[in-house]
Structures are given as structure tokens and as C-alpha cells.
Amino acid sequence: MAAAISQENKDSVKELKEILSQYHDFVITTYSGLNVVEMGEMRNAVREKQGRVKVVKNNLFAIALKESSVHKDIADEIGNQLKGPIAVTFVGADMSATSKALVDFGKKVNKVEILQ
């Protein structure tokens, strides 16, 4: 029997679904070892490319994907790959520019790995 989902988690899933409806593309990264300043720098680098970085709970992100009309077809495949602490970068208009910002930042701090 599955445990009941808390209201806080329901709200988080709702927020993730809203973000997924606005940003159809996303990149999943690790962020272990980043301090607050470095996380802020990563967010700023992505924001400059019209993207958005959000630290998410794996199971809540998997639920949001399954409930997303755009992403439900890939939800199981991606959900199975979600391990450990992750951040999702929601991509604006330019996937290449946003991905480059993540790669460049990852090289700079050597603590970020692109997973998907």
C-alpha cells in the first residue's frame, strides 16, 4: 500500500508540472559539493540563457513527469535514472546556449555532472 502524499509534496508536484508546461526541455545534473555561492552562480549562468535551475526530489519529479501531458511518454525512462541529489535545468528557447552554460560552469567548479 502506497503512503499518502503530503500536501507539501502535492504542491511541489503541482509546481513542477507548471514549470514543465512552460519549459518543455530540461537537463538533469548532479550538484553535490556545490556551496550556496556556487549554486547561485550556476543559477545565474542558466538564467542569463533564459533557463531555470531547480533542485528537486527524485520521486516528486518522476510523478510530475508522469502527470505531464508533454513528458508522460518518457517519464518511466527518466524516472529510472534519477539517483542521488539532482537539479533540473529547465531550458528556455536555446538548448545549446543553456547546455553550454552548464558545461562551462561544470568545468569551472568540477562538481557538476550532466546526467540527462
Image (spheres, rainbow, N blue to C red):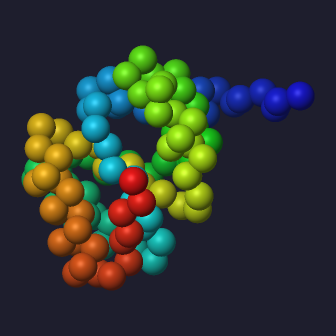
Q: Is residue 79 above or below residue 41?
A: above
Could you say which quadrant of the image residue 36 lies in? bottom left
Q: Residue furthest top?
A: 69
**In the image, is 5 to the left or to the right of 75?**
right
Could you say which quadrant of the image residue 110 lies in? bottom left
Q: Residue furthest right?
A: 1
Where residue 34 appears, x then y in whole percent?
A: 40, 74
Where residue 38 appears, x then y in whole percent?
A: 30, 73
State the residue at coordinates (42%, 17%): 69
State the residue at coordinates (34%, 31%): 19
Q: Is residue 102 above or below residue 111?
A: above
Where residue 23 appears, x then y in whole percent?
A: 27, 32
Q: Is residue 58 above or below residue 38?
A: above
Q: Quick check: can you spot residue 69?
A: yes
Q: Depth check: give the residue in front, 42 or 90.
A: 90
Where residue 59 appears, x then y in whole percent?
A: 62, 42
State the residue at coordinates (54%, 26%): 66
Q: Quick check: can you spot residue 11?
A: no
